[in-house]
Image (tube, rainbow, N blue to C red):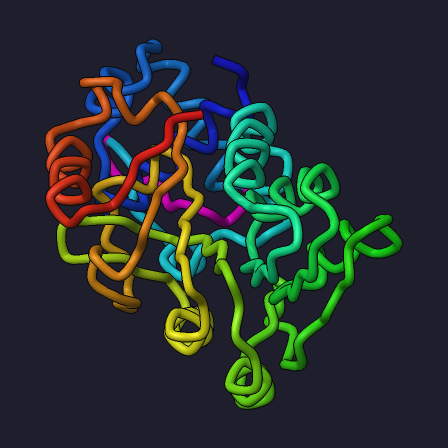
Amino acid sequence: MATRDRLDLTLRLVQGAERATIAELARRLGVSEMTVRRDLDALQEAGLVRRVRGGAVATRELREEAGYTARLGWQPAVKDRLGAATAALVQPGETVLLDAGTTTVHVAQHLADRAPLTVAVLSLQAATALADVPGVRLLVLGGESRPGERSLVGPLALRALAGFSFDIFVMSIGGISADGWSEFALEDAAVKQAALPRAGRIVVVADATKLGVRAFAHVAPLDVVDGLVTDVGARDPDLGATATATLTALTDAGVDLTYA
């Protein structure tokens, strides 16, 4: 596993548990405890975790989600596969609402292959990725740019969403558990909640480390979503019992699972 991918997974494991031991992280990651210690030191230096005796705990910043810039270079190959698989679910001629997040930027990059499309975006990064793409009519919805994430949130974004209907909403998410879809920031959760009834189909794109994670703000129950695109790591039994239980709950809720 590449160092950046291992750091990303370590971060998510600490995030999901709020406190993770070095021994448990080493077992889950298949690396030595010394490697885990070095990784935790790097994450602490970045302000994303706090070292405690025998392990690490989530910092305030981590609970509210690590910033876009910190996550941008992590798991690029996985995110690109997820982006391509998600874009393939979009049909030419459809109207698309694209959520904020590092993975949805990869979706945006692959949407050019599905043109002609009308795409409304909820992030400045997605807007940049789609600007001047032939065959894509780009709509940048109003809103306040959330510091660190550059997602468009607040009353302006909520009012803008109320004026549109979409064929498909491609939603990113912070946590997936049997309790439902959840986010780390109230502002992002509110935008997702406003967007859900505005689309005919809902597809969530999220890597496997989100499985079993229950974030701060509940967005919706599992059955409001039509499909989840995740990576093949979701099938790894070492991901844990909570993640496995979440996959079962998704299937029971009628959510179609796509593995990229």
Residue 81 image point, x, y percent: 55, 27
In front of the other: 178 or 217: 178
Eyeballing the image, is 94 above or below 81?
below
- In screen coordinates, is 32 left or right of 169? left
**Residue at image coords 58%, 23%:** 77
Q: Is residue 256 above or below residue 58?
A: above
Look at the picture and state if 188 lies above or below 250.
below
Nearest the camera: 104 or 167? 167
Q: Position of residue 182 (x, y in %)?
A: 30, 60
Q: Quadrant of the C terminus?
A: top left
Residue positioned 55% across, 43% down in the render: 103
Image side of residue 125 versus residue 171, left or right: right
| Residue nearest the viewer, comparing 77 with 147 | 77
Could you tell me how many numbered marks the image carries? 0
The segment highlighted magenta reads 46-54
- What residue is at 50 percent from the left and 49 percent from the top? 47
Q: Is residue 123 left or right of residue 226?
A: right
Considering depth in this image, is 248 or 88 the residue closer to the camera? 88
Residue 149 horizontal/vertical position (percent): 59, 61
Residue 200 placement, left or right of 152: left
Residue at 67% x, 81% y is 142
Instruction: Give the image quarter of residue 27.
Output: top left
Instruction: Indicate the quadrant where residue 221 lies.
Output: bottom left
On whether residue 139 falls in the magenta region, the answer is no
